[in-house]
Image (cartoon, coloured by chain):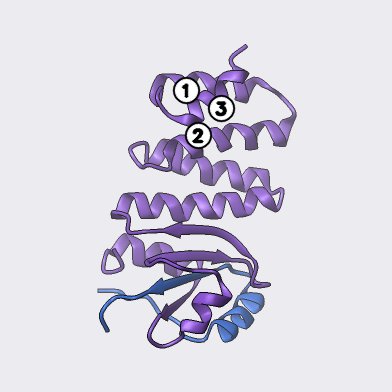
Chain colours: A blue, B purple
């Protein structure tokens, strides 16, 4: 089963998005941890 | 929905994925004006919000919303060929999704914007009237029916 490689640092992910020219998908959750 | 293989593949192929939990980073909920969960935002690489999905959706509807968001992203960047392809992917490929009527509408607009030919608008009005007669998108397109 493949899983999503979630980032937890939005600013680091934005830097990666600029490098790879891809949009971010930011998931906001309150699900039980 | 995230355990679904189709969702995982779509997200990995199209996005840099970020997850934010309210207990870990409540400040980011404020920064992005998020007041309900689940919420997903599509941000461009400069951090500007381009699309928002609020509330739980079943897999087909969720995938349709993500594709709709990418289509609107392309449309706003005036990449009308990519926008039309993505809108049609929802309109024709996921016709039972809640986002389908809106996607059909914007597919027609994208085709018009790319060519200045009003024929796609008339065809869209007919399609929406036939397929989704009670949707607001059919009513919006009715002005094109001539």
- Horizontal placement of A5 versus B27: left or right? left
Which type of secondary structure does the marked residue at label 3 adopt? Answer: helix
Please tell me which of labels 3 and 2 falls first in the chain: 2
Crowding at dot 3, Cα within 10 Å, few <14 / some 14-19 / many 20+, comes out as: few
Q: Residue, x 28% and y 63% (percent of image)?
A: B1
* Residue B113 quadrant: top right
Q: Using the image, determine if residue B125 lies above or below residue B57.
A: above
- Return the chain for callout 2: B
Residue under label 1, please give it: B127
Closer-to-camera residue (B109/B141): B141
Residue lying farthest to the top in this orientation:
B146
Residue B140 disc label: 3
- Horizontal placement of B64 versus A2: left or right? right
Closer-to-camera residue (A18/B65): B65
Residue B49 disc label: none
Label 3 – label 2 distance at C-alpha:
12 Å
- Horizontal placement of B14 versus B55: left or right? right
Closer-to-camera residue (B55/B1): B55
Residue B104 disc label: 2
* Residue B73 quadrant: bottom right
Foreground tag (3 vs 2): 3
Crowding at dot 1, Cα within 10 Å, few <14 / some 14-19 / many 20+, comes out as: some
Q: Residue, x 57% and y 37% (percent of image)?
A: B106
- Horizontal placement of B63 versus B110: left or right? left
- Return the chain for callout 1: B
In the rendered image, the quadrant that contains the C terminus of chain B is top right
Dots 2, 1 in contact, CB < 8 A: yes
Measured from the top left, where is residue A24 in percent x and y? 54, 70
């Amino acid at each position: 089963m493949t899983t999503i490689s979630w980032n937890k640092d939005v600013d680091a992910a934005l830097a990666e998005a600029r490098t790879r020219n891809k949009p971010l998908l930011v998931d906001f959750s309150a699900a039980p941890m | 929905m995230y355990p679904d293989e189709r969702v995982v593949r779509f997200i990995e192929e199209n996005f840099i994925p970020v997850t934010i939990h309210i207990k870990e980073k409540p400040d980011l909920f404020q920064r992005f004006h998020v007041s309900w969960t689940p919420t997903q935002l599509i941000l461009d690489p400069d951090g500007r919000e381009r699309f928002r999905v609020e509330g739980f959706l079943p897999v087909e509807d969720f995938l349709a919303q993500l594709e709709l968001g990418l289509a609107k992203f392309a449309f706003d960047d005036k990449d009308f060929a990519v926008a039309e392809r993505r809108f049609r992917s929802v309109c024709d490929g996921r016709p039972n999704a809640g986002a389908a009527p809106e996607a059909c509408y914007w597919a027609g607009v994208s085709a018009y914007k790319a060519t200045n030919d009003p024929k796609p608008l008339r065809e869209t009005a007919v399609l929406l009237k036939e397929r989704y007669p009670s949707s607001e998108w059919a009513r919006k397109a009715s002005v094109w029916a001539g």
